[in-house]
């Protein structure tokens, strides 16, 4: 009897994400140490953490006849892949894509991390505990950054806090986005 066909997709380059090494190591340990996984057929494809490549990878996984797909860590890749998997009847188990609409719009998607709403609520609670009432929020142009910034804005309004447009008027500054953009933002701020 053929084994379960599991597709795995994420950005696998450790130079671009700190999660690549940890994720791949966890899969290797699981595969090598859990005897029941011996019959699983694995198919790894890098989605580049981008929407266009995410859709391409999804089509490859569908053509390969994956039973389930683990991954699409980035919200950008996951949101473009999810409807393709849904149409093909393939479950998507996403350990890191936080964008709310992913699970709201696609019943085949199961998230194993907090959503943008949860992250924003937790962040705003922490900001309130520090008594920072005026918050400047910026984001990169990724789906993740944009959706998280919207969620933070909604959480701020719900908490009676103020989102300000001018950084100089803020008690604190928040940047929502991918690692590279976040790093570049904060390095530029330090200059």
Image: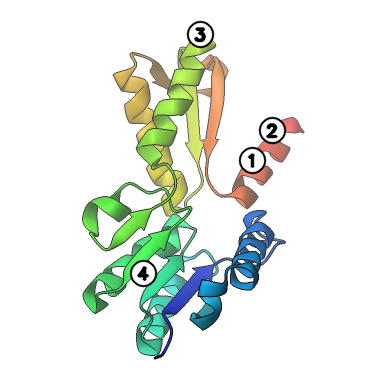
* First along the sequence among labels 2 and 4: 4
Q: Residue furthest front?
A: 35
Q: Mark 1 Cα within 10 Å, few/some/many (few <14, many 20+)?
A: some
Q: Residue at x 38, y 15 (%)?
A: 161
- Location of residue 148 in the rendering, given as x and y in whole percent from the top left corner: 42, 40
As rendered, which of 186 and 115 lies closer to the eye? 115
Q: Looking at this view, is 93 or 76 the one in front?
A: 93
Quadrant of the rendered structure where residue 29 is?
bottom right
Q: Residues within 10 Å of mark 3 (few under 14, many from 20)?
A: few
Label located before the other in sequence (1 or 4):
4
Q: Secondary structure at mark 1?
A: helix
Which residue appears at 52% of the width and 64% of the height?
Answer: 49
Q: Nearer the viewer, mark 1 or mark 4?
A: 4
Residue 163 shown left or right of residue 157 in the figure: right
- Which disc, if any, is residue 189? 2
Q: Secondary structure at mark 4?
A: helix
């Amino acid at each position: 009897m053929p084994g379960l066909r599991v597709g795995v997709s994420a950005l696998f380059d450790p130079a671009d994400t700190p999660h690549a090494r940890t994720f791949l190591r966890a899969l290797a340990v699981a595969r090598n140490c859990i005897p029941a996984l011996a019959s699983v057929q694995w198919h790894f494809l890098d989605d580049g953490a981008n929407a266009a490549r995410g859709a391409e990878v999804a089509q490859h996984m569908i053509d390969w006849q994956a039973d389930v797909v683990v991954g699409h860590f980035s919200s950008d890749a996951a949101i473009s892949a999810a409807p393709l998997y849904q149409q093909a009847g393939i479950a998507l188990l996403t350990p890191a894509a936080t964008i709310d609409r992913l699970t709201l719009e696609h019943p085949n998607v199961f998230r194993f991390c907090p959503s943008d709403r949860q992250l924003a609520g937790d962040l705003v609670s922490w900001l309130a505990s520090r008594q920072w009432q005026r918050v400047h929020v910026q984001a990169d142009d990724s789906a993740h950054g944009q959706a998280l910034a919207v969620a933070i804005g909604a959480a701020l309004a719900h908490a009676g806090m103020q989102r300000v447009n001018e950084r100089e008027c803020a008690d604190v500054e928040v940047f929502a986005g991918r690692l590279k953009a976040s790093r570049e933002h904060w390095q530029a701020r330090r200059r």
